Amino acid sequence: MATIVPAVFSFVRELYQGSFDIEAFEKEVGRDFDSSEIAQITAKFEQEAKGLRNKDEIRRIITFIDLTTLNGDDTGSKAVAVAKRAIQPIPTDASIHCGSVCVYPQRISDIVKYLKETNQKTHITGVAGGFPSGQYHLKSKILEVELSVADGATEIDIVISRAAALEQDWKTVHDEVHALKKACGNAHLKTILATGELKTLSNVYKASWASILAGSDFIKTSTGKEAVNATLEVSYVMCTAVKRWFELTGKRVGFKPAGGIKTVDEALAYVVLVKNVLGEEWLNPELFRIGASSLLDDALNAL
Ligand SMILES: O=C[C@H](O)COP(=O)(O)O
């Protein structure tokens, strides 16, 4: 780490030695963002997205989708039905798969059982760690992650503590994500910032950094349960942090916009944003996902 991270990011080195210096964190990543400037940039992305609407791009979008069902009345058979769609979303094309099927912890084992019985594979994302509010004891968040991984989730989506973020307690945000990353074992960790509840773009940037520094494999905008979910504006700020981390360390963290993305046109705007800010190399399911429950319907209608 010492040879890769420049001196200006000395706090990253200290972090890896087990300390989190909040003053250094604020100094290094505290910055303001100009909303109107970002709005102009994202308006261009939306414009560019209009020219991208073709069948190949729509098929590619389908491969990015974490096909989601997160409802109180989800049953085992509903979860399995969604998993079947994630495995073969286009009925006439067995070569295309969604990024994963995303469910609550109690539904993970239903999908694992179905995959075993039918000898099929898909990534299973379990939302855990006090999803969606994060208002739970850390011990129960850790246990929920451990149980979800034991049940067979290959990817875990957790939420940050918005309470800690709003109190500018970035050490707690970082330390919780770090503990949950450890609980994931080999499962990939996607950390949800719930940006609609973070109040400022400066907070979105700091939350991105705290989550990246804690070892998140992806950072994700929203749970789909906040009043305001994914927006291009917060995505721009989050991808700016992902890009800076890559410039400093050579490490690629993934990005997942989620919540309220229902149409191909909306999804294409995120594709253009990622391509422009992070580069084409991010546009594969290893580094880019879209969390969505209904986007697949619009994509299939458009094919
Ligand atoms: O993580 C995925 C989101 O919960 C999905 O949200 P959505 O139902 O608005 O598509």
Image (cartoon, grey):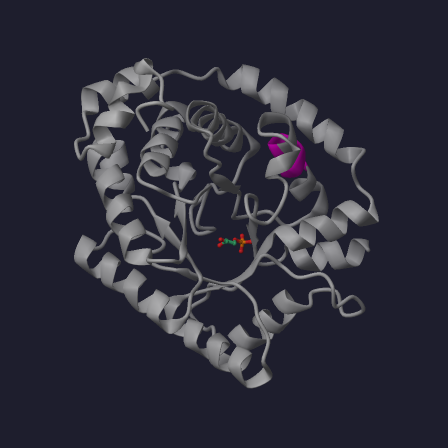
The residue lying toward the viewer, choosing from 94 and 35, is 94
Determine the image quadrant of residue 10: top left
Q: Quadrant of the C terminus?
A: bottom right
In the image: residue 229, left or right of residue 213? right
In the image: residue 148, left or right of residue 48? left
Q: Residue at x 76, y 70 (%)?
A: 91
Q: Specify the segment rendered in magenta.
A: 269-274
In the image: residue 21, left or right of residue 38? left
Q: Residue furthest bottom?
A: 117
Task: Tell me where residue 207 appears, x and y as whole percent.
Answer: 34, 33
272 is within the stretch colored magenta = yes
283 is within the stretch colored magenta = no
Q: Quadrant of the N terminus?
A: top left
Q: Residue furthest front?
A: 3
Q: Residue at x 67, y 58 (%)?
A: 296
Task: Tell me where residue 96 appears, x and y as whole percent.
Answer: 71, 61
Q: Residue at x 69, y 40 (%)?
A: 268
Q: Main secondary structure of the magenta part?
A: helix
Task: Tell me where residue 77 appears, x and y as whole percent.
Answer: 53, 81
Determine the image quadrant of residue 87: bottom right
In the image: residue 106, left or right of residue 243? left
Confirm whether residue 241 shows in the render: yes
Confirm whether residue 167 shows in the render: no
Residue 259 to residue 1: above or below: below
The residue lying toward the viewer, choosing from 10 and 146, is 10
The residue lying toward the viewer, choosing from 257 and 142, is 142
> How many labels sit on residues?
0
Task: Tell me where residue 275 appears, x and y as whole percent.
Answer: 65, 31
Residue 136 to residue 277: above or below: below
